[in-house]
Image: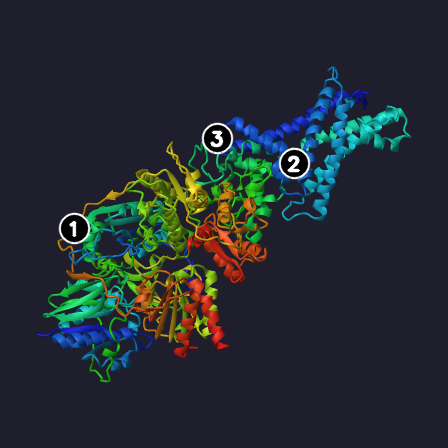
């Protein structure tokens, strides 16, 4: 029984099918062309390198979609729905082909037992998944899940498709004599409900189901590029073109940028095509918002909204039928669509990008927009002062560059000058570790540990400048370039075999954003070096430390650069018992200092700052008196948070180096 | 022949400023060493009564006219020029304040006589007058000799004792005429700061915050400390410029001059412009992370440390003591 | 902008008259480099000058405000901003920075600023301004910073006013063009300000601008360095380089230094509380 061999008001079924198909494909094609046109109006960016690696990355992350499983309430459901879609899409195309070209000597998919089995099994799996998804939306929707009519409509359409499939199978079963078959288990189960129908009627109903199914799919096809379901088509490309494949996460350089990127984007056309693609790929799931420390603390920033607003704005402006000639009344990208306070609230912690199931890149977008604000000088006073200090003195404290290595004088050590003699490890200390009185003691202890372990190390002394990581994240690209040049000049004069840094921010930019031009040396964080030294038995420990500690993974060490184990090995080597916080490793909760935020002021009173939230998480562990950090900014942020949360007596914030130093004392 | 010394009197709203007495003191000191008379030049509207308090001078040269309420330099400078010639004055002493700002330079240019700024010390050495000035915010001092004893000097407020310039004597008053002119700078009126807020000059305890307080939120901590002490929060200029506190709380050269029993300075470096405004406080306790901060040079007690950390601890202690 | 500082003044501030004759102002900003006090200052071996080994220079703070005020006036009323400076270490960077912020012309007078006192400096500026390169027009405002930390000889603005026979007001914190003149606010003490009406052309010593100096991104300054040029104006220095001879330069003794309190923050809090009790304050 060939469903297209019917007559619709005198027109042959195949003709109707052709007509519907052409209309659907036509509308879809036109819309797709419009949207691609929008992308082409964006700035160029070279993401066409390493096609092999990109393909493999896309295959893994689209077909297996490990990130979807990050939220257990919906992970499996989406996975099944996705695979259901793959099976159904395959069968649809097959059916369409056969329907449009009846002369082809191929059967319909529902005439092939194996195909039917797959279709039926998946229809049930998908229906169960849809029920779970609907229940989640209705009864226990997580915050920031966009509850839209669009989403529910799509769920309904998919359900309808599954049902037409099942009912069609049931009707065919009845039409063929009501014998159940293992190849159509669920259709067979349903069939008895329609046992009363005559074979002809049953066949008619089956045909109707087939047509209904095809029409819904074609309709879906038309609806898709106008709904959030566009992510279906855009996301695989988004994943394919994602930056994480070819470049380290911590690298904000725009590859192959033909225009001057230092001034950022003031209009949507100045965003790159990849940044615009993010909008189409976003499935409005809200994972990013749920992970974001700024959102949780009550700042106006929601990463999902950044993406969505850009999409809406680009579509409104780019697809507008009548263009206002004078341009008056055109909403401004920064200011009207996205506010400045949203942009400045980001700590660049990378939680959003780590969770995003379609691999969107929110942080580079935010930084691009910040660059625009900086180029206009629209930066708050405290940040301006910091940038002026950095420009003039190479550090954010406004102190003389000659004071950078003053801490050495009170350390009791003679530390080599790497500018004058070769060293094995060039220690790039960083601003906070050098100038902040709260961190200086830890720096001295680190120096003593290195010395006693017999590490051959030296400093750049006054020639060291802020490495520029946070300067770049604030959007001052020009200053970043200047600092980078000065540091590279100083480094070129020194002889060393590896670099070690105290601050994870310094670590990130030296490792990932400085061009070594063939002179690449290993860049290590001091916890890695401590780990190596302890493993080699070079650190003279005098006693074992006992007790329970919890370790806070710094954003720029953990999420950005994948270093989770070295610090933990160090702690265990000292004899400590590590109790993990619920948000551990790549789920670590940012202290709130990154992205230049440590230089910014909070204009309003916030219910809870990120560092306070994190300290409370640690306190809730119960009987864990030590909160271990591996970043100088963390020392500052968390010690302040102890005071403001009133937990000072219960928890102490210690740096890993301090604990190692403790173990080295008799 | 001993030359005369002119002192330009500073007054506001019927009160003589301390700098006037400080200058009279210096004038007397120099006159004692090298002879000569000290004349106080008093300009203004309805300032007659003030003349009687200027007994440390040998005479008061008075110009009291309605249009002299706030004379501009275009009026003062020619007058001083005229008086210098009349009295054969070799030295003119001006206050290093905003009120007398710029007069020295202009007078110096017209009289072709050197002008010495930021003067904190004066002595007669080997027949010559040696003036000590501070430079670079007080970090460096310089000694300049006025060979023929002729010059115009800007006297740094607070550098000399005001007591030396007070006297019970009633000086003779000589009326002088102000040369006419069509000033291109016309005084219109005073713009008062918003006085609905507290008057910090009347407080006996002040908790002062500077840059080192780091953020507007921490001002709240200072408020709590001030409350516990029965005092009020004030600030140095950078904090006012940021908008964290209103102008009425500014202490310093362009702000208020205060003399409380207790001045707690948190995160204030002690730049001269601020120091000017609070140096006479009875007890100054300063907290700053920089051990080289100039404020420690003049404070009674100092702490090298983090103000933000210390303030709440101190507040708790004080509340505990008060029971 | 500070919440309260100009609020009172603003409420009664004259609004710009739309028929104001000001269409254009010729704004000339004079810049001076001064030793950066972030560094330690030492006296040279001759005992009369600063040790130049670690000496760094930065733009005099009030001069930065003068530039900002000039740019604000240009934005409000239209006109041209010219910045002029004598030669000093790092002055080129500052001149380019001024151009990047929006100044139209930058002129460097190749005379060593450090060797000249304020009086001689003022004379050089005066010569420049009276010459073809400068030109005082009826709509000219000369805006030096009010004073500098090394003004032993006094303020350049005062001397300049005399040399050019122009009216002068110092310690200015606000400038508004009104009806062909300017109305300025001069700071007195106690937070009070005096309002003066000044006829142009005039010299105004700027203490602080109405808004904090704007930020200009490094990339823009670098771009300007490549595209713009600093003009030079050859002016012969006056005979008398310094009006005052410094007999001796020295560092002050730290007389009457504070009694420093040591210990943990808790100890210190306790000690201070004790001191206050002793003094009868609590």
Instruction: Identify whether A164 is placed above or below B94.
Output: above
Cα separation between marks 1 and 3? 58 Å
Chosen colour scheme: rainbow
Instruction: Identify whether A274 is placed above or below A291.
Output: above
- Any mark on residue C237, and which? 1
Q: Depth check: give the residue in front, A400 or C4.
A: A400
Q: In this view, does A225 lie to the left or right of C138?
A: right
- Circle 1 or circle 2, nearest the eye: 2
- Any mark on residue A46, and which? 3
Q: Mark 2 points at which residue?
A: A229
Cα separation between marks 3 and 2? 27 Å
The location of residue A118, given as percent across then percent down, is 74, 28
The location of residue C113, given as percent across then percent down, is 21, 51
- Circle 1 or circle 3, nearest the eye: 3
The location of residue B78, given as percent across then percent down, is 20, 67
Q: Depth check: give the residue in front, B19 or B113.
A: B19
Chain ID at mark 3: A
Q: What element carries label 3?
A: loop
Please indicate, yes or no, whether residue B194 appears anywhere in the rendered image.
no
- Any mark on residue B22, and which? none
């Amino acid at each position: 029984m060939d469903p297209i061999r019917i007559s619709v008001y005198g027109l042959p079924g195949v003709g109707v099918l052709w007509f519907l198909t052409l209309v659907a494909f036509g509308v879809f094609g036109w819309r797709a062309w419009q949207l691609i046109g929008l992308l082409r109006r964006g700035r160029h960016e070279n993401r066409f390198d390493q096609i092999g690696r990109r393909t493999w990355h896309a295959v893994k992350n689209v077909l297996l979609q490990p990130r979807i499983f990050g939220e257990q309430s919906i992970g499996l459901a989406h996975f099944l729905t996705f695979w259901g879609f793959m099976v159904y899409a395959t069968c649809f195309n097959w059916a369409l082909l056969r329907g449009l070209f009846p002369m082809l000597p191929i059967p319909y998919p529902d005439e092939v037992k194996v195909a039917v089995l797959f279709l039926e099994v998946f229809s049930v799996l998908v229906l169960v998944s849809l029920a779970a998804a609907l229940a989640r939306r209705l009864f226990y929707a997580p915050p920031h899940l966009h509850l839209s009519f669009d989403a529910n409509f799509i769920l309904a359409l998919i359900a309808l498709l599954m049902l037409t499939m099942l009912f069609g199978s049931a009707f065919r079963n009845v039409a063929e004599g009501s014998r159940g078959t293992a190849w159509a288990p669920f259709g067979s189960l349903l069939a008895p409900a329609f046992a009363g129908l005559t074979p002809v009627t049953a066949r008619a109903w089956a045909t109707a189901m087939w047509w209904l199914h095809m029409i819904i799919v074609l309709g879906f096809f038309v609806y898709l590029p106008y709904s959030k379901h566009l992510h279906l088509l855009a996301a695989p490309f988004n994943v394919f073109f994602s930056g994480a494949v070819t470049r380290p996460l911590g690298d904000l350089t725009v590859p192959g940028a033909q225009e001057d990127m230092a001034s950022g984007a003031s209009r949507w056309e100045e965003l790159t095509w990849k940044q615009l693609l993010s909008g189409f790929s976003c499935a409005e799931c809200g994972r990013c918002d749920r992970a974001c420390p700024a959102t949780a603390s009550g700042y106006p920033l929601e990463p999902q909204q950044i993406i969505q607003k850009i999409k809406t704005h680009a579509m409104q402006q780019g697809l507008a039928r009548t263009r206002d000639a004078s341009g008056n009344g055109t909403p401004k990208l920064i200011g009207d669509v996205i506010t400045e306070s949203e942009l400045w609230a980001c700590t660049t912690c990378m939680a959003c990008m780590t969770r995003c199931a379609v691999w969107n890149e929110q942080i580079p977008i935010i930084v691009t927009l910040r660059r625009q604000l900086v180029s206009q000088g629209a930066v708050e006073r405290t940040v301006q002062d910091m940038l002026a200090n950095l420009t003039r003195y190479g550090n954010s404290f406004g102190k003389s560059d000659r004071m950078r290595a003053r801490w050495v004088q009170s350390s009791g050590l003679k530390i080599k000058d790497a500018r004058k003699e070769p060293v094995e490890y060039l220690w790039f200390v960083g601003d906070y570790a050098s100038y902040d009185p709260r961190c200086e003691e830890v720096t001295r202890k680190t120096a003593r540990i290195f010395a006693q372990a017999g590490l051959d190390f030296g400093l750049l002394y006054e020639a060291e400048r802020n490495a520029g990581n946070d300067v770049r994240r604030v959007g001052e690209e020009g200053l970043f370039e200047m600092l980078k040049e000065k540091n590279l000049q100083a480094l070129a004069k020194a002889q060393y075999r590896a670099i070690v840094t105290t601050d994870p921010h310094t670590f990130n930019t030296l490792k990932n954003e400085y061009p070594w031009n063939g002179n690449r040396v290993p860049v290590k964080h001091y916890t890695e070096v401590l780990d190596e030294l302890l493993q080699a038995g070079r650190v003279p420990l005098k006693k074992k430390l006992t007790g329970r500690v919890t370790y806070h993974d710094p954003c720029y060490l953990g999420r950005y650069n994948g270093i989770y184990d070295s610090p933990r090995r160090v702690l265990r080597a000292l004899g400590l018992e590590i109790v993990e916080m619920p948000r551990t490793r790549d789920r670590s909760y940012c202290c709130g200092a990154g992205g230049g935020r440590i230089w910014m002021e909070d204009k309003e009173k916030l219910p809870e700052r990120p560092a306070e939230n994190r300290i409370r998480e640690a306190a809730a562990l119960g009987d864990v008196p030590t909160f271990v950090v591996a970043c100088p900014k963390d020392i500052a942020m968390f010690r302040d948070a102890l005071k403001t949360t009133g937990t000072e007596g219960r928890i102490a914030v210690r740096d890993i180096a301090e604990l190692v130093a403790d173990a080295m004392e008799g | 022949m001993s030359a005369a010394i002119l002192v330009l009197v500073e007054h506001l709203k019927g009160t003589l400023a301390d700098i006037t007495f400080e200058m009279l003191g210096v004038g007397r000191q120099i006159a004692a060493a090298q002879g000569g008379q000290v004349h106080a030049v008093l300009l203004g509207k309805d300032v007659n009564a003030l003349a009687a308090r200027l007994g440390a001078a040998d005479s008061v040269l008075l110009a009291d006219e309605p249009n002299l309420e706030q004379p501009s330099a275009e009026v003062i400078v020619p007058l001083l020029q005229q008086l210098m010639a009349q009295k054969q004055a070799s030295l003119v002493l001006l206050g290093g304040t905003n009120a007398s700002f710029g007069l020295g330079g202009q007078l110096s240019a017209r009289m072709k006589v050197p002008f010495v700024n930021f003067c904190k010390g004066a002595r007669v050495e080997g027949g010559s007058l040696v003036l000590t000035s501070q430079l670079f915010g007080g970090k460096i001092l310089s000694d300049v000799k006025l060979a023929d004893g002729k010059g115009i000097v800007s006297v740094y407020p607070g550098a000399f004792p005001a007591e030396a310039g007070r006297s019970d004597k009633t000086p003779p008053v000589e009326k002088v005429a102000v040369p006419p002119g069509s000033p291109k700078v016309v005084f219109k009126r005073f713009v008062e700061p918003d006085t609905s807020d507290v008057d910090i000059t009347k407080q006996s305890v002040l908790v002062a915050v500077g840059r080192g307080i780091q953020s507007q939120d921490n001002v709240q901590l200072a408020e709590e400390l001030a409350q516990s002490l029965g005092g009020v929060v004030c600030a140095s200029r950078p904090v006012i410029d940021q908008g964290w506190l209103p102008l009425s709380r500014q202490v310093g050269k362009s702000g208020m001059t205060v003399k409380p029993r207790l001045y707690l300075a948190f995160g204030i470096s002690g730049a001269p412009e601020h120091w000017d405004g609070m140096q006479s406080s009875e007890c100054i306790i300063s907290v700053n992370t920089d051990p080289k901060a100039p404020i420690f040079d003049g404070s009674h007690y100092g702490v090298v440390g983090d103000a933000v950390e210390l303030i709440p601890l101190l507040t708790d202690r004080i509340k505990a003591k008060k029971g | 902008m500070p919440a309260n500082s100009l609020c009172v003044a603003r409420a009664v501030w004259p609004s710009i008259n739309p028929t104001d004759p000001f269409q254009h102002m010729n704004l000339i900003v004079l810049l001076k480099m001064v030793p950066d006090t972030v560094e330690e200052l030492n006296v040279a071996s001759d005992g009369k000058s600063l040790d130049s080994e670690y000496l760094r220079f930065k733009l005099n703070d009030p001069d930065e405000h003068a530039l900002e005020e000039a740019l604000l006036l240009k934005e409000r009323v239209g006109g041209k901003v010219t910045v002029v400076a004598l030669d000093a270490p790092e002055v080129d960077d500052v001149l380019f920075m001024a151009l990047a912020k929006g100044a139209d012309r930058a002129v460097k007078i190749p005379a060593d600023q450090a060797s000249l006192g304020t009086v001689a400096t003022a004379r050089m500026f005066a010569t420049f301004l009276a010459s073809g390169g400068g030109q005082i027009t009826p709509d000219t405002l000369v805006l030096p910073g009010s004073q500098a930390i090394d003004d032993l000889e006094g303020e350049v603005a005062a001397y300049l006013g005399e040399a050019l026979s122009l009216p002068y007001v110092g310690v200015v914190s606000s400038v508004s063009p009104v009806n062909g003149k300017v109305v300025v606010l001069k700071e007195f003490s106690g937070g009070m300000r005096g309002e003066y009406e000044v006829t142009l052309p005039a010299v105004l010593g700027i203490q602080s601008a109405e808004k904090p100096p704007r930020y200009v991104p490094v990339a823009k300054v670098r771009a300007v360095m490549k595209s713009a040029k600093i003009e030079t104006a050859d002016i012969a220095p006056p005979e008398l380089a310094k009006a005052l001879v410094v007999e001796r330069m020295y560092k002050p003794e730290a007389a009457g230094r504070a009694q420093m309190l040591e210990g943990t923050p808790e100890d210190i809090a306790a000690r201070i509380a004790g001191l206050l009790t002793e003094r009868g304050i609590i």
